[in-house]
Image (spheres, grey):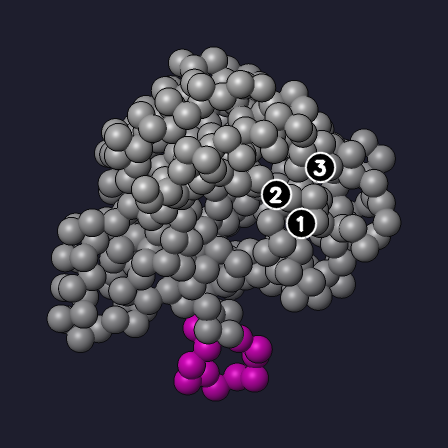
């Protein structure tokens, strides 16, 4: 029996047809499709098209944001409980990482006893919107790689700070053909600076630039995905998550009613590490894949010898189970049956 995957992209005939038209046009590099993708993403967030810049990946988006914000030589705070791409981008930008813990059992940053920093990267992990303290908003890059479509106080995430980034990797909420990203700026002049940075070819000055451009082949897939995201994907993810809630599972959710999550991940939060291990083994026996979202060895900042008790707690008390639009009804039913018969 085939194992039910933990995650997979949701792609179909609409994406294939759109990509085929771009290929047939003879223009696959950055062009009209990329500009239209930027316009559509900006429109959802209530901004003119010029405020969004599409790029080749989410990592490129973060690096580009740090570059425009002149992070080199500065101190950039980021959570220890996060993907390593954040740390990589900070170091590649010539900045010094400052690691923050999270509150145990949540994705909320813990600023108690934080070292001084100049900029902050604030991820919206697992599709959960969390509050950014007012005193930090003006120096924050909002990382929405996992949270497109989530809202906070009825405003989309990505509009809480001057700069935000998105990822369109294969297994993110939408994909632009396997890789892709975008940066959104409240200030158009900042967006213009980034466009200049990635517009690398046939320039007469000696300014350092780099090719992080999105292609039209990526963008046209992203356009189809963005449309399907709001008409299909969000509802399908919510449908799956609701089934899990009806089983009475301890699921990670926003802690305020005005914080509306998008169900990028369904995270079970058992009371003990032993239960996490037992449940993962049980699901594997029932051909259901699950993952520890961030494992202990992946916690950032270990080389500093600092303790991150909140991050450590999360690595031992969270298990992610399948939740994606291309799950079939039969697959969802199989996962639910396996969860129902689990004995702690």
Work out which quarter of the rendered image holds the N terminus and state it: top left
Distance CA(mark 2)–CA(mark 3): 9 Å
| Badge 1 element | helix
Residue lying at 33% horizontally and 48% vertically, measured from the top left = 9
Residue stretch rendered in magenta on the structure: 199-209
Q: Is residue 105 above or below residue 117?
A: above
Q: How many marks?
A: 3
Locate residue 276, reporting x and y percent.
60, 30
| Front-lying residue, 234 or 284 | 284
The tag on residue 298 is: 1
Locate residue 321, reporting x and y percent.
46, 33
Q: Which sits earlier in the primary sequence, circle 1 or circle 3?
A: 1
Residue lying at 67% horizontally and 29% vertically, measured from the top left = 273
Asked whether residue 202 is drawn in magenta, I would say yes
Q: Kindly indicate whether the residue at mark 2 contacts the one at mark 1 (C-beta within 8 angstroms).
A: yes
Distance CA(mark 1)–CA(mark 2): 6 Å
Q: Is residue 241 visible?
A: no
Residue lying at 14% horizontally and 71% vertically, measured from the top left = 25
Q: Kindly indicate whether the residue at mark 3 contacts the one at mark 2 (C-beta within 8 angstroms).
A: yes
Q: Is residue 187 above or below residue 194?
A: above
Residue to which mark 3 is pinned: 311
| Number of other residues with Cα within 10 Å of mark 3, as a class: few under 14, some 14 to 19, many 20 or more | many
Magenta stretch, main secondary structure, is: loop
Residue to which mark 2 is pinned: 294
Kindly indicate the quadrant of the structure image that contains residue 324. Answer: top left
Locate residue 47, reporting x and y percent.
38, 43
Distance CA(mark 1)–CA(mark 3): 10 Å
């Amino acid at each position: 029996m085939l194992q039910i995957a933990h995650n997979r992209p949701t792609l179909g005939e609409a994406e294939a047809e759109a990509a085929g038209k771009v290929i047939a046009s003879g223009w696959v590099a950055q062009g009209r499709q990329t500009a239209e993708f930027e316009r559509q993403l900006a429109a959802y967030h209530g901004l003119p098209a010029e405020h969004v810049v599409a790029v080749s990946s989410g990592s490129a988006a973060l690096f580009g944001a740090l570059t425009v914000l002149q992070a080199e030589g500065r101190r950039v705070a980021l959570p220890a409980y996060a993907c390593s791409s954040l740390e990589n981008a900070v170091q590649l930008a010539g900045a010094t990482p400052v690691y923050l813990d999270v509150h145990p059992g949540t994705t909320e940053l813990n600023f108690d006893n934080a070292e001084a920093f100049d900029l902050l990267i604030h991820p919206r992990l697992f599709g959960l919107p969390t509050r950014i303290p007012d005193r930090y908003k003006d120096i924050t890059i909002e990382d929405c790689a996992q949270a497109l479509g989530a809202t906070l106080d009825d405003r989309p995430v990505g509009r809480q700070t001057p700069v935000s980034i998105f990822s369109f990797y294969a297994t993110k909420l939408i994909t632009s053909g396997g890789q892709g990203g975008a940066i959104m700026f409240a200030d158009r002049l900042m967006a213009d600076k980034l466009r200049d940075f990635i517009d690398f070819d046939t320039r007469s000055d000696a300014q350092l630039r780099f090719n992080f451009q999105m292609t039209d082949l990526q963008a046209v897939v992203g356009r189809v995905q963005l449309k399907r995201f709001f008409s299909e994907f969000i509802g399908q993810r919510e449908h799956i998550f609701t089934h899990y809630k009806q089983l009475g599972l301890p699921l990670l959710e926003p802690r305020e009613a005005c914080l509306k999550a998008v169900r990028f991940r369904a995270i079970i939060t058992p009371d003990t590490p032993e239960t996490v291990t037992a449940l993962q083994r049980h699901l594997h026996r029932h051909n259901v894949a699950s993952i520890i979202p961030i494992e202990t060895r992946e916690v950032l900042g270990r080389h500093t010898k600092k303790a991150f008790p909140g991050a450590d707690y999360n690595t031992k008390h969270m298990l992610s189970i399948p939740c994606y639009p291309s799950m079939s009804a039969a697959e969802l039913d199989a996962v639910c049956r396996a969860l129902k018969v689990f004995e702690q």
